Each structure stands twice: as C-alpha cells, then as structure tokens.
Image (tube, rainbow, N blue to C red):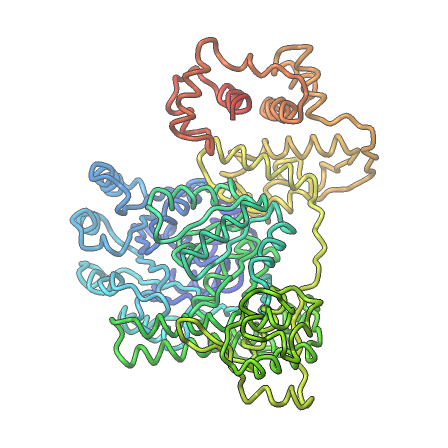
Amino acid sequence: MREKAKEILKKLYGYNEYKKGQEEAINSILNGNDTVVIMPTGGGKSICYQIPALIFDGITMVISPLISLMKDQVDSLKTVGIDATYINSTLSYEEIEYRTQDISNGTYKIVYIAPERLETESIRRITRQNKISLIAIDEAHCISQWGHDFRPSYTSINSFINSLEHRPIITALTATATKKVEEDIIHQLQLKNEMVFKNGYNRENLTFTVLKGVNQNKFIVDYAIKHKGEAGIIYVGTRKDTESICRLLNKNNINALMYHGGMNAEERKDNQEKFIYDDIEVMVATNAFGMGIDKSNVRYVIHYNMPENIEAYYQEAGRAGRDSLPSQCILLFSARDVQLRRFLIDQSEDLDEIRKRHRYEKLQQMTQYCHVTTCLRKYILEYFGEENIIDKCDNCSNCNDEIKKEDMTIEAQKIISCVIRMKERFGTKIVAEVLKGSKNKRVLSLGFNDLSTYGIMSEYTIDSIKDMINLLIAEGYLRMTTDEFPIVKVNKKAVGILKNNEKVYRNVYKTEKVEVKQELFEELRRLRRNIAKEENLPPYVIFSDVTLKELSSKYPTTKSQMLNIKGVGEKKYKQYGELFMDKIREYVKENGIEVDIERSYMNVVKKASKNNKEASYAISARLFNELHDLKEVAKERELKLRTIEDHIFEAHKKGIDVNIDQFIPNGYEDDIRNVIEEVGVERLKPIKESLPDNISYNAIRAVIEKWY
C-alpha cells in the first residue's frame, strides 16, 4: 500500500516527495490505526486522509465545520482527478437526494459533511448503504472546550461513530492544539490505540512582527500601497473599525472589501468569493472571516487589534503563506486592546468561573507575546509545547534587522512630566495638544499654556505624539483608566526614566524594497486568472503561486519537463499544461532564450535585449487586422489559438485599434449585456451558462471589454 500511496502522490498531486510528517501519518492510517495529525497550516494535512481514502475500498467521510471551504476542497480534488462531493445546508433537498444516491452508486470516494448534519436521515442512509472505511475530523480542536474555537456541534461526533455498525478508522486533524487540547481530542473521540503525529508548529516562511505605539491607520495604508498587487488580510476587532479602515484603503486606491457579522450572508459570501478569485487585493475583516479560506497566496496578514489568545492569533496569522512562500504576519499592539478583551470576557454570561479564569490566563499569555524582547517565534512554539527551540530565528522583529530601534528617552521624559503637571486628569488627545503647543480653546481656557511642558514637542505632529504616548502605555510606563472617558496616569515604572536610570526605545519599521515582479510570472498569473474565470474556480486551484514561480524559472516546454514541476499532476497537465507551455514558449521566443528540450532542465544560451522590440500582443493584433482570422494568426505565429485570443484582448486594453466587435454575433450584444447586469463580470462561466450555446467566451469578453 505504501507504493500505491507514493504513486498517487506523483500521478495525481504532482509531487515526487511527501512534505514533512505526511508519510508517517499516511502509513499509520493505512495500517488501520486511529491517528491524530497536528500539522501547521500549509503543511498538507488534507493529503494525509485523501491518499488513504483512494486506497481503501469504502467511503471516507470528512467532518468539517467549514461549509464555505467544502466547495473549494471538492473543486481542488476534481482538478487532480479525484471524485468527491459535499453535503451541507447550502444544498436543496433535491440536490442532497441526488448526491446521496450517487454516493450509494459508488460515484464518490470522499464525502465532506458538516457536523450539524450527522443526525439527518440522508447521512444515516449513506452509512447504512455504504461501507465507511475512514472518518476524518478536520479542525479537531473544535471538539475541546479548552480550545480557542469550541463548537457544540462537534460533541455529537463520538455518538455518531458509536452508532455505526462497523467502526471505521478515525483520523483527527488540526493545526493548533496545546497538550491539554490534544489530550481532550483523544478523550472526547474515544480513540483506540491512537498514534499521534506532531509535525511541529513552526512556519519557517512566515516573518512575525509586533509594533507598538504606531499610527495604525497610516501604517496599514503605507503597507498596502507598498505591497500593491499582493493579497492581504487585515483583522480588526470591531465592525465599526472594519468599515472605517476599508473606506480608508479604498480612498487611497487600494482595492479592498470588508467582512463582518453585521453584513447579510449574501454580501459576505460575495465579498469572500471576490477575495478568493483575486478580484480584490485586501480583505478587512473581523475574526468571523478566515476559517473557510483555503487561499494559498495571501502574502500578508496584519492584526489591527490584538486577539484574545495565542491559538486565535496563530490561526489567523497562519492564513498567510499557505503556499510556503515568504509572507508577513504583523501585529499592531495597543494597550486598549487588553482592556477591550478583558471587558468582553467579563461580559460573557455563559462562562463559569473556571473557564473565565482559563480565558484570562490565555489573554495574559497573548499580552506577554506583544511585550517580549526575545524571539517571537520561540515564544509561540514554546506555548504549543515544542522543545529544543533555537533562541534566535532571524525571521521575527526581535531577531532580524527589519525593525530599527530609535531612542525616545528624552521624548518619554517630556511626556511623563507633562502628564504629572496636568495632575493626571486628562486623556491622550489633550496631553498631546499641550506638548504640541496647541492654541485651541480648551487648552488655553484651562491655563495649560502656562505649564513648563507647553509646546516642548512642537516639532512633532499631534498624531505622532499620541503614538509615543500609546507606546509608553504599551510598555507600562503610563496607564489608561477604564472610565467612559479614559485618562492617562503615571505608573511607578516611569520613575526610572525621569531619573535617567532607564532608556526607552521605539521600533521603527524600515522602508522596504519593493520587489520587482518577474514578467513571465505575472503573465502566467494573468493566464491563470482568465482560465479560473471561465471555469468558475479560484485561481490557486488551477496552479499555486509556488508552481507558477517554478514554471517562471525553469521554462518547461515539453510534457516530461512540465510533469517534473511541483504541483503538476497528470490530470492538471492534460487540462492546462499546453496553455501554460504556449505562454512559456512565446516568452522564450520573444526574449531570445534557447531551451534544451532534450533535458529536464532549461539551458539558457542567450537573452536578447528587449529595447525597441514590438510586444507580442501587438504583433498578433497587427496580423489579426490584416488577416481577420484568429486561426490564421495562430498558424502564422506558431502559437495556440487561445494565446492569440488573449493577445487580441490585451491589445485592445492597451489602446491598440483592433476590431473586437466581430466576435459578437449580430443582434446578441444587448442579450449578453442583460445577463452581465444580472450575474456580474467576476466570472465568465455563469454568464456563458445563461446564454445560447452559439455565444462564445470571446463574445462575452468583447462585450465586457467594450462596456465594463
């Protein structure tokens, strides 16, 4: 069976080797053991049950709380040639009946099910009529009340398993579980002779950064502008802030949408799909967003507010870099976050004293993370119980040189002195105004212009002074009261600063070099996005960014070379291989790159200068204007028809005079527009399905290009 498993890995998934920990977990399941898999996000947990599912003779049921993720997972499986389906509350009664019958007919090997449906008649019928070989429980930490995301629906899983005539192999999978949660998973599921595989929690590709006392809004706007073209998530603590930050980003020409519990379900679903399908760059969201997101190419996650515990933070930050490429996780800390989190715990009426104390402890551990001066990665890994961790990772803000330290001891002395002279009776804003030397009515009426600290920081803006005050609060030199109108107080810790016995430093995020995107990589991304639109699939389901980067560096132009690229299995090669190789061949030809087609690697002989060279799409457009026939242009240029079609529309976008009206059948333009008005332009397949068969994708693209 091990040989069969390795064959499936290569043939279907396109990988020659397992990722760390996968092989051991797969072998355990194939040997009939109940198995617990604790593997970091992006580590490939799904393959651990999917490969055994294809080898076992019965059905594998995957219990998952992530309804929004089920369709993506099923779509991904289908693209590699695996028959799978899902049953959840998004389906009609008739559709559930059809799928139940197909399962009984042996159509599907893997069935995804929401835990709420385990007691329904349709699921009971499946278990009566089919052999259940394996039950995989995804997000298994949800079964533990000591976890950060306890779900009551998970408590019914064990009784469901016990109700089956023959007990299947049980596999529990999670990315975040402390030792206490791990033990609770085993206890709640009553696992037998279980094997536990911990692949560690370390996400080496993620850079962790904590910034205190920064202007959060300014930082987010600056960062999003510098990383334009990359996907990012900004997690925010409240609905109000979610809306205001989204507006701020849009105002600065950042393509962002929002997601929070106050929006209606349809709007949330629509915004989530636009993010998944790369129609927007940034999602601003509360923690209601993310559990159903399998988007692999999120390059950064910024926390505008501190989460309540390490598990929640690590899971949300872990949305970044699921494709194993370098990604950023940045937490913008404010002391007010701690007050807010304590307030929310206090107001939780459903908590007994034991669980409330447990949450306070977790909040304290999260707060400590934001203040440690040692390695951030080490702190997280030790929290999850890992041992023998190096003291310096060189990939967090406490270890690397991305953050520079600026001495602000003198500024701190000025601020603390001012708070004292104002009798510790006022809030951040008015303290900053006094230090700035503001002449506003309130400052003058209270006589603060007579203080010795009035105007002693006039060279700073009020916002930057407030940032420094917030830093002193975060570091414990000052504190904020919890009144309706919080005021600033001085802590004993501040005495050391006033007596010059202690220094205060602030972290400043260094100006980053904006990475120059590789031209071929960007062309392959555009091709991937066009295919995804037509097939109504998320782009990363076609090929991941990792695969595109390898295609962009190795220039495969033959089938054998293509199948040696990570993530290209036989099914995906058959579907998409030639389309991507056409684009690569075109790029190679344009840039004077000679490729040795006899070998499994690229041999670059020369790369000609591109100066004064006519763009490929422009050549195609010129020939099309002469020949008026796409097939003839493709033949003349020795390129695929699909490539020429893309060139024509690219040329039109660039302002080249090319007649795209000839793609639109006479009398159908208004019909196409009416359908577009109804279903939108995000994906082409729903438009195509609502029109007569004689309307081509090119006709739809032409109408969109003209009118939208």
User: As drawn, is 422 to the left or to the right of 500?
Assistant: left
Residue 652 quadrant: top right
Residue 497 quadrant: bottom right
Q: Position of residue 50 (x, y in %)?
A: 40, 52
Foreground of the two, 561 or 77 = 77
Residue appearing at x 65%, y 69% in the figure = 437
Residue appearing at x 47%, y 74% in the figure = 366
Q: Position of residue 304 (x, y in %)?
A: 51, 62
Foreground of the two, 132 or 118 = 118
Residue 589 quadrant: top right
Q: Is residue 388 visible?
A: no
Q: Position of residue 290 (x, y in %)?
A: 43, 55
Q: Looking at the picture, does residue 425 appear above or below residue 510?
A: below
The number of callouts visible is 0
Q: Quadrant of the N terminus?
A: bottom left
User: As drawn, is 63 to the left or to the right of 703?
Assistant: left
Q: Looking at the picture, does residue 411 appear above or below residue 520?
A: below
Q: Position of residue 379 (x, y in %)?
A: 54, 76
Foreground of the two, 560 or 79 = 79
Q: Looking at the picture, does residue 53 appear above or below residue 394?
A: above
Q: Looking at the picture, does residue 392 appear above or below residue 150?
A: below
Q: Is residue 131 visible?
A: yes
User: As drawn, is 323 to the left or to the right of 114?
Assistant: right
